[in-house]
Image: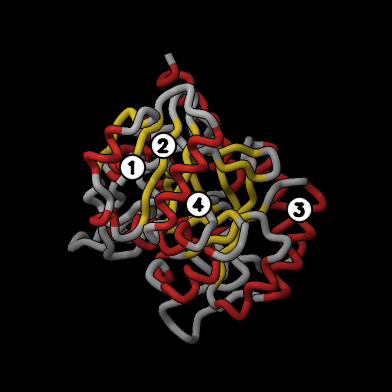
Amino acid sequence: MIAVLKQGTTDQQQENLISWFKDMGLDVHISKGEFHTILGLIGDTTKVDIGLLESLSIIESVKRISEPFKNANRKFHTEDSVIDVNGVKIGAGNFQIIAGPCSVESHDQIIEIAKRVQASGATILRGGAFKPRTSPYDFQGLRGDGIELLLEAKKVTGLPLISEIMAINDLDLFEDVDIIQVGARNMQNFDLLRELGKTDKIILIKRGLANTMKELLMSTEYIMAGGNENVILCERGIRTFETYTRNTLDLSAVPMLHELSHLPVIVDPSHATGLSRLVEPMALAATAAGADGLMIEVHNDPEKALCDGAQSLTPDQFDTVARKVRKIREAIAE
């Protein structure tokens, strides 16, 4: 349930109303917009007398929300959320490109790639230190050493970092990582999501391989219900019966998630297609569809990459994509 307060409501009136709700055992989410303040009521709202609530002089309107996700719901927070990553903003018209290798392999590799993607316009550096792999015999990442190499790249370039977490026990290693990524395979690792909800870290959560948008938003709710509202959604393709691409990129998810939620939505065309030659057209299409950013895999020598070389762009290819993305952004802004 949401209660929209009238303009001119005093802080004391608002506090009195919130106390009344809390006395009924409800949690209250406060969203202050330019013109209205919205109180989102979370819990058993059946005990709330809507007629009585609507009769209060400070109430403009009251609505029940049927969707099970509350904190991520646009009805709770009508304006787009903006996530600030050390001055790099994502959402509400702020568009960013995240780029870097699937996995961190060496000092020279990550430093070179970081410099090259930054020169081409990337504003956030990605790199996997912990790698979930289908086969136990594949390269699993450098783990803690990989995080240290990412931090070295951050010192050299100043780029904020994003890296994927695999387990709660590794959380301490991510203290200096700016964005923690929850990968597709962990989207419904609810214990991990609850723990991340207790932190103030920015969390990027990817849609699972075979999950609906509703399930993605419900997983997001686990994080936000814990008090952490710094969340970014990521569409990275879903598994269908198609075999020519690694996954099927659901670009309809971009406008649909924007309609359902106030959170930023970015697209990962690399994992979606699994083919480097398809990254450019899908990146351009995602930009045109209204994505708040892109996550693109870049490797200085894709043929020798220890992970996902087939879907990685070279730095030169990334530069071309970044330039075209900027042109698309200019076109849709008109």
Q: Nearer the viewer, mark 4 or mark 2?
A: 2
In this view of the protein, which residue sits in the foreground, 281 or 216?
216
- Looking at the image, the residue that sits furthest to the bottom is 136
Residue occupying the point 33% across, 33% down: 56
Nearer the observer, 83 or 316: 83
Q: Which residue is mark 3?
A: 154
Q: Nearer the viewer, mark 3 or mark 2?
A: 2
- Disc 1 + disc 2, Cβ < 8 Å: yes
Q: Amino acid at mark 2?
A: Ile
User: Relative to residue 306, is residue 147 drawn left or right?
Assistant: right
The CA span between labels 3 and 1 is 42 Å
Would you name the residue on which mark 2 appears?
A: 38
The answer to which of marks 3 and 2 sits earlier in the sequence is: 2
Which one is earlier in the sequence, the residue at label 4 or at label 3?
Answer: 3
Instruction: Assign a secondary structure to mark 2.
Output: strand
Q: Amino acid at mark 3?
A: Lys
Mark 4–mark 1 distance (CA, rounded to whole Å): 21 Å
| Residue at the outermost top position | 334
Q: Alpha-carbon distance for marks 3 and 2?
A: 39 Å
Marks 3 and 1, the one that precedes in the sequence = 1
Left or right side of 29 for 144: right
In the image, residue 92 sits, relative to residue 234, either above or below, namely above
Counting other residues with Cα less than 10 Å from the Cα at mark 2, is it few (<14), some (14-19), or many (20 or more)? many
Judging from the image, what secondary structure is the residue with disc 1 in? strand
State the CA–CA distance, disc 4 to disc 2.
20 Å
